[in-house]
Structure formats: structure tokens, C-alpha cells
Amino acid sequence: MQLELVVNGQARADEVEPRLLLVHYLRDRCGLRAANVGCDTTSCGACTVLLNGRSVKSCTVLAVQAAGQQVTTAEGLAGPGGDLHPVQRAFREEHGLQCGFCTPGMVMAATGLLAENPHPTEAEVREGLEGNFCRCTGYHNIVRAVLAAGGTLDREVPA
Amino acid sequence: MSILGTRVLRTEDPRFLTTGGVYTEDLQLPGECHVFFVRSPIAHARIRSIDLSAARAAPGVIAAYTGADVADLPLLAPPMPHMVNGQMGQPLLARDVARFVGEPVAVVVTEQAYQGEDAAELVDTDYEPLPALVDPVQAGQPAATVLFPEAGTNVAATFGDPGALAGDLFDGCEVVVRRTIVNQRVAPAPMETRAAAAQWGEDGRLTAWIPNQGAQGTRDSLATMLGLDPAGVRIITPDVGGAFGAKFGADPEHGVVCWVARQLGRPARWTETRNENLIGMTHGRAQIQTVTIGGRRDGSVQAYRLEILQDAGAYPRFGAFLPALTILMCPGPYAIGRAEAVARSVVTNTTPVGAYRGAGRPEATAAVERAMDLFAAETGVDPAEVRRKNLLPRFSEPHTTSFGAVYDSGDYVAALDAALAAAGYADLRKEQEARRATGDPVQLGIGLACYVEITGPGMEAGGPKENATVEVHPDGSATILTGTSPHGQGHATVWAMLASDELGIPVDKITVRWGDTDLIPEGGGTGGSRSLQQGGAAVQQASRELIELARDRAAAHLEASPADLLFEAERSAFAVAGDPDAAVPLARLAETGQLLVRTIFSAPGPTFPFGTHVAVTDVDTETGKVALRRLITVDDAGTVINPLLAEGQRHGGIAQGAAQAFLEEVIYDADGNPLTATFADYPFLSATEVPSFELAGMETPTSYNPLGAKGIGEAGTIGATPAVQNAVIDALAHLGVRHIDMPASPQRVWRAVREAAAGKGA
Amino acid sequence: MIPAPFDYVAARSMQHALDLLADSPDDDAKLLAGGHSLLPMMKLRLAVPSVLIDIGRVGELAGIRVDGPDLVIGAVTCHADVASSELVRAEAPLLAHAASLVGDPQIRHRGTIGGSLAHADPAADLPMALVALGGLVEITGPDGVRSVAAGDFFVGFFETSLEPGELVSAVRVPRCPGVAWGYQKFVRRANDWAIVGVACVDGRIALANMGPVPLRARAAEQALAGGSPVASAAALAAEGTDPAEDIHADREYRQHLARVLTRRALEHQR
């Protein structure tokens, strides 16, 4: 069936089967491969993108459910010159990524979190990221990155 | 001012943060077909028949195959053939017998990815269930199912001789404690599951993209699997989304994907689901240990024995061999006068066990640290004091243990003191006392772990060595080729730092490459925490040798004697001593001919990082729930080249180690069905279960490489697990609890509290 | 991890959805709102409907409003909106709290109250919360609208009293501003389903994951109503329960948790 939606500000029209998951639509049809599939049970969050500005797990959204709506992926966060978005920059500065597989989803979840709660506490960051798994970092620097992006790092966490 | 020792941000990151890493699943091979595996749903069964007809007729199906189709390929042989029973090889696809839930039995190949699962459902397999052996303790019983009738035994390997254990080992000990404890099976669960993409060239060569921990080892494994000359195989390593020991070499599925590509004459690709990963990727740990510890009432330990039963899973992989490392490290950082250890690895109808962060050494530390606390409880001596009394005193000359491990340098008491100070140990004990006095339902536990571990042992590279190639280009940039294989550790940044420090070329002008066996035919990969001390040392060595190579060219260029030239790294140039204007940039010297050095760095042996972890837990005695409040660590891995990255390695290791202690566990039912085969059921650690960690710094250099560096990658895992386990038990010690097996799940903890209260003892 | 193939249609209105349901044979069409109960089942191929009727953007099924003594919440209202609604937080704070604990933020941005109730997972937050609140499930079908008390709506393990051709159109919750409520959700990880859950408000105590449906701890309620102290009443919380056993908890431990959590829910009301 026909699907029309806006991805990273660009209008798109594609022919899709109903069961196509949004994550696969983004990866395979739009060529936006930053979002990854890390599990089968809506647990890990590696596929997180923003749908109308709200974080969602794109593995559990059918592409057709996003018809007529706006999707933002990690690729859509950077500035026109490729400048890192503040959340992306914070992740780099705080070494909030190692293998990078969870990172785009983590960054999108963090971006969504900060949009709803701009200056979170450490506890709020940890709870806000409860739907995003990371095996490499132990979460320590990811939390620092989100606090830094929210301007509360020095207040919340010792180095 | 050297760049070494500074917090250089990773050069890898901008790409990962914006467009994302390029993992195997992200690659697209023109004309590719998709491979999907059919797996046994039964732990042990004779495969009577497999009917592919309905699957073959399904939409998009190109082909379907079973074990019969690949029967001419050799079995995947157990590692260490001189140590592990060679009659327990694994077919790439099961032939007559399936031996674990998840074992691949057939494969369907489709045009589109989604069609694979549809077609796989139509494969009709007729199984005749056989008795399943799930409990390793039963493996040696006469009535037990024998998994490999040709082998006639379920024993895959033995280490040491149980019959030769000294009957008088504990003679003269005032106190002896013996306990059987479990180091439970866990799932490595990297965020990227296993995958492969393969294509054969007109020249008959195979090119395979596989996430791995060492392309050279993967090439060799695949070549053996497919009966090929390794020269006919090229492995290219895409970005790898974590590995933790489970992506070394090749699994049967990788071989099948390559085989399919050749069969069909078109590229083939495969990415496993998380469910497949949790039952198909090798598991970790899975040891049952009996510890016996004896000594005097004053807390000094005189004797220690460790008896290990290793569950190897259905087909012996590296896990069957790991007890050898456990035995090697069994006395840990302690001076124990008499110690001995034996082990047996047995097969069971479960997922094969392989290496997992620490690979044999966490098991050793967990055992001796539990033993130390049991001994402390029995003697009534404070657990920190028991450790202090028994730790090897500081040494800077190599120290050989009775097990043959040569510890290169160590100051274990300093690590203990530093950790206790950072934790505020005395205050914590006061807080614990106060809560005990009021009968607070939430009790405080303080757990310790002192560890030493072996890094860079050299099994994967024929010795503790690594190669590096450094080339300086006329445009002032440089390229490094390394035999290591990073998957998150940041070698691209750190190797560039090392070369930059020598050559004066900025980090962002240095490209590091790895993982392509045509480009780098030899290498030991990344695992066993070997990379910096061998691979990084090789980069530094190559850089230094390059300067010496360039010196002659500079001398010719400047019409001076080589001995009169100084290399000034700050401006990346040779200058005549005393005449700074008579200088030539290093890059310029690349114009007359390639300026490149390939070198091999060899270490005298493995190194032994060490440390102490202190865990602080709140244990809710009414519900059994454990909350990890603080984790304070000292992890001394010698000289730290990039503190930002070293801390990251510690954080990740600590989290995984802690997760084993109170959260994660692979569970099978009595029939061998896995009960933790999704991320909803397997309690993978999330950000809400751990606090921010408190890392204290300590650097005791090694003399084994010019960097003074040991390996840091696994140390965090090794220390954290016993520290957290000991903390949980410590919280309940006043109630009479002496031991709780891992993971300290709420139900387990609650049961322990109840049993202690009922006076059954613990 | 990919659903089996199906047809999809986006309903334009509630009536359109009902017509589509009527046109499909039983169990072959499923309604899709947020999809965060249904799609995970379909991805594991535990549910294989041939048609999905998407009601996620049917306006009549959205919105939160006051209607006399009740709060009325449209079925496709997502958990995040229930949790952050000023109206719900003021009038039925227990419900807002329950919604704020479902899964994780991403799940709460998609999962809906109607979908959660229709899914009827006895371990879930919203079914338990609605039973504690004494709410009603408003059901619209070909013959019109009917309301079912929460306690009667959940009839079995993942089973409701919805008839074929019906859909959950709204949830009615008695307004109880200022009435003390308690909530305890026992989990190993923050985004897990409750191993055991307890919600209490206004003399009612509901339990999650203590049976095939959310249960009322009637013996404990009666003891409380009769003036028993909290601790004694809570000690009766597990009476009449027959909890299942799984990798997290056996029967005995679950019943123990029910007692402890009930006591804590009553002691720590807000």
C-alpha cells in the first residue's frame, strides 16, 4: 500500500507491505541505517527514533502507522553543516559510546527525554533511559552525557 | 607535553553519532539473498526426517538445505585438541541428532529478509526426543545420557587429577570451611547479534564480512570449516557492536552462510534475531565450584583447594578449556602456602559455553573471594583484615606462583587500602551497625573483592606479541595497520595517540586500519585484554623504528651525519643538532620512497593487572530486593594512555560483573528448554539498576613493554562480581546467612533470610 | 521477529472501525491502537490476525474530559498522556501514577489505555489500577454502548468480556481528588512487568500478577473496613489467591510479596 510521511524533514512516498516495521522502512527504504535492531521484544531501544517529536521504538511501530506524520532519526539531528547536535556533542565529550550500536537509539531517547524534562536529575536520567540497553558503557558516561546536555552535570554526578 | 595520559576524545565518534556505525547488517551486497536458520526446539532428539517441500514452495524461497547437504564438510572441532575430547565435534547443520535447543538443523534462503521467517515455519521436522542431560552434576553418573556415543563419556576435558589431591592439605588448620558454590551461566548478549555476509569471486576466493574479534582467527576458522586454504579467504571486519569474548573465530552459522553463497553463486547474508542470539551464541561462565579453605583463627589462610565442574554445553568450545585459566589464577593475589585445584568439563544438552569477559579468571576470583569471606565469617575476623593478612606483599620483580603464573608487578595491599579509603570503609561499618541495631528492614552490605588477573596470555597469536605497520605519507598524514580488532575500545584513537606522540603528526591526521585479512594477514585480534600492551606497544615500536629508518634519508637530505640529527616530535621534523633551521619535515622524507615500517612487538609474557572493588548494597530483608548503592574500585593496569577510555572500559566491565552478581542468569528447565531466551525474560542490566561508579586511580607499571601498560578490559568484570555478591551476603551476615548463590535474586535472598531465621543455618 | 503477513486498514471513525470488525470473521481481525501489546505478540507470531484495523487516530476515541462524577478517558489515549494529564493527576492520581510506570518512556508514548485493558495482562499496571479505582470500561459495539465494571471486565488470563465486533471506546474512572492512594510495583528492572503489584484507594485493594486476572484482596479490605490495623489487614492480602509460578517467583514468594506490598501500599499512601 501507499505510504506518505516526512522523514528528517523530507517528504516521502513509498509502496510498502503492511507488516513492514518502521525501523526497516527507515533502514532499507530510506537508507537511514543509524537506528539498529537489537532485540525482538521491544526491550532494548536501539531502534528509538522520534515520531512527532516523541521517542518511540520503531521496531514496534508499523511504517503504515506513521502515515502523514514526522519521523526524526539520529541522522536528522545534526546541523546542516554536519555540526553535532548538543546531545550528540555531549555524548562525544563524555565518552558516552563505545561500540556505537545502542548509540543512535540512546541519543534519540535522550533527545526525547530532554525535550520533556530539560534539566533532569541523575535518577530521572536513569529512569528516562530504562528502555535503552547498553552493554559497553555501564551507563555511567551515558548518564553524564545526558546531564551535560541538560546543563546539570556538575550538580549531579562526581567525575 | 606528551599527549599520552591525556583525555583525548575519540576520533571514531562523529561518524557513530551522526550516521551511525556500519555494522554487518548495514552492508548491502548487490544481488544478495537472505539466510534464515531453522533450529531445534528440543534439547536432545534424534532427527528422523526434515521435509523441506512446503518451505521450498513458499514465496521468495530460493533454496533450503539440511545437514545432509553439508555432510562433506568437517565437524567444527573442539579447541585445544590436545586437551579437549576430539570426538565431540559439531556439524554445521545437525545431521542425525540435535543436542541443544537452538542448534541449527536446516536453513532457508530467500530473496527478501522478511520471507525467511515465513518459510522457516513451513519446514517440517520430525524429532524423536531423547533423554536430555541438563544438570552437569549428572553428566558423570552411570545412568546419564551420553551425548556422543562414540566418545563413550560426557567428559570433554580434565585438568589436574582428582585422585592426586593431597589428603593432608588442611592438616594443622584450626578452621576449615568447605562449600559448593555456583558461578552461573550468563549470556554475553552484545547489542549487535551475530551476522555474516559472504560472496565468492570469479577467482574462487571467498570474501566474508563478519563481526569478529580477530579477522585472522576468523579467516582460519572459516577456512577449516569449509575445507579451504586460508589464502583463499578474505575477512573484512565491519564495525562490530560489542563482542565480550563471544565473537572469536567462527560459528557453524557463519560457515553455512559462506557455503550457501557458493552453492547459489550469489552473495548471501544473515543476521540472527535476539532470541537466536540468546540461545545460539556461546554462553559464559557455568562453573560449579567446591572451595575448601583452611587456616588459623587469627585469619591467616594456610591452605586452599578449588574443585571445578565446568558445564561445556552441547559441543565443547572455548568454555571447555577455560577451567585451565581458572586453575592458573586460583590463588589470586594471596600468599597461600598450600593450594591445589582440579577441574572437569562435561557436555550437557545446552548451548555451548565459550569465552565471556574475563574468560576463566572471574571464576577464579569469585571462588577465592567467596572463600575469603566464608573464612572471615568462620573466624570472626573482619573481611578486609583477612584479606590484608593474606595478600602477597608488594613486589616489583616478577613473582611466580605455585601454579606457574608469573605475576609481573603488584602492590595488592595498596590497592586494598586505596579502595577502602575511597569507600569510607569504617563509616560504612558504622552505618551497618546502626541499621542492625534498629532492625532496619533494609540492611546495608559491604562487599570486597581483591583480584589479580592475567592479560595478554598469547594463545591467539602464538605468543604474547602483535604486529603493527606505520606509514607516513608525503602529505603529512599517516596510516597505521594493526593486528588488533577493536569493537568499542577506541584503538583508532589510542593507536593514533601513540604514533602521534612519537612522530609529531596530529591525531586527526592518522588513520588506523584493522580487520581486513588481505591488508593485514596476521594478527591476534582483541580479547584477553591484550591490545594496548601488545598492539599499542607495536605501534609505538613501529613509530620509533620509522624514525630511525627516516634518519638516513634525513641525513642525506640535510647533508649531515645521522648521528648529528635530532628528531623533534613537536614539529615532526629532523634537525641538525645546534642548528634548528637546518631541518626537514618527516613527511618530506616520504617523497623519495615509501616511508613505512612493519614491526612485531613481543612481550616477555602476559601481565597481571590487579585491584580491589568495594560494593555497597541495600538489601530489603522483607522482599529480598537488592539495590546497588555504590561501587568503588581500584583497577591497576599499569600506565594509563587515555584515562577517558580506560575509565570507560572499567565502567562497562563493572556493570557486567555486577549484573552477574544480582541480576543475570541463563535458566533451563529440566527438559533443557531455555527460559530466558528474550530480553524480556533475560534480566539484562538497564541504567536504573546501577549507580554511577567511583573509580580510584592507581598505576603500577609493568616492565614488560615500554608503555608500562597492562590490560584493563576485563578487570572491572573480575572484581565487581564477587564484591557485589559478598556485599549482599554481608548485609545478612548478622542473621546467620553465610552464602547465597548468584544471582542474588529477590526470591533467593528472601529464602536465605527465612532459612537463617528458621535456624536452618545457611 | 517479523509478523506474519496481514492486511491493514486505517479506520476513519469509530463507526467505520465497527463496520470493519463486523465484516471480518471472529478472531481474524484485530484492532490496533498503539500496538504495544499486539505488535510484540505478532512479532513472536503468538498472534496472527489476517487484518489489522488501526483506530490509533480516530478522534472520537481520544481525549480526557470530566463527565459529572467521572473522568472519561478515550481508549486510544497513550500512557504518557494519561500520566501527564493535569486532569488525571488531580482527579485520579493513582491512574496517572500507574500509567507513568508502564514499560519505559518510548512504550508510554505509544501504548494506550484501551489497548492495555483489552490485552488484559494480569501483571500489567492499568488493569490493576482500574480495578482498585472501581472504574468502568465503556464498550461500543454494533448494538450500542455498554459499560462493564473493571472487576467484571477481566474474565480470564488475557481474556476480557469483549464480544466479537466490540471495541473498548473509553474508560470511566470515579473522580477521587484528595483521596489517599497507595501503589507498589515490585520489579527486578525498572521496565519489567510487576512480579507482584498492589494498588489501593478508597478501601479497595487490587493485586497484579496474583492470578489470571487482577484480583481484589477482599479479606484484607474487610479487615481494614472492620478497623484492623494495617499490618494485620495486609497479612490477609494473599487469601484466595492462586498465583502462577515462573522464573522470578514461586507461589509462596508471590503470596509473601502480596502481603508485604499491601502493607507498604497502605502505609505509604499519598
Image (cartoon, grey):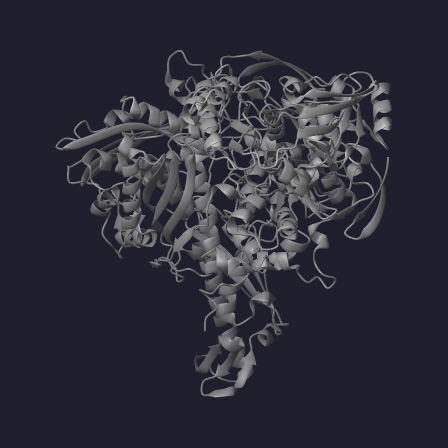
Measuring from the top left, give residue B413's x and y in whole percent: 26, 52
Q: Nearer the viewer, residue A132 or B359?
A: A132
Q: Residue furthest left?
A: B172
Inspect this view and state whether residue C1 appears: no
Which quadrant is the N terminus of chain C positioned in?
A: top right
> Does B739 sit left or right of C80 as displayed?
left
**Towards the viewer: B124 or A158:** A158
Q: How many marks?
A: 0
Identity of the residue drawn at 32% across and 40% down: B328
Q: Quadrant of residue B67?
A: top right
Image: A146 above or below B201: below
Residue B196, given in percent of the width and then of the height, sits at: 64, 39
Query: What's the residue at 60%, 57% (across, down)?
Result: B13
Q: Quadrant of residue C127?
A: top right
Q: Is residue B412 left or right of residue B123?
A: left
Q: Quadrant of residue B65?
A: top right
Q: In this rendering, is residue B78 above or below B690?
A: above
Q: Is residue B142 above or below residue B385?
A: above
Q: Say which residue appears at 65% left-offset and 41% top-offset.
A: C106
Q: Can residue B96 be seen?
A: yes
**Residue C166 screen position, x and y as percent:** 78, 21
Residue C101 horizontal/vertical position (percent): 58, 36
Please tell me whether residue C182 is drawn above or below residue C26 in the rendered image. Answer: below
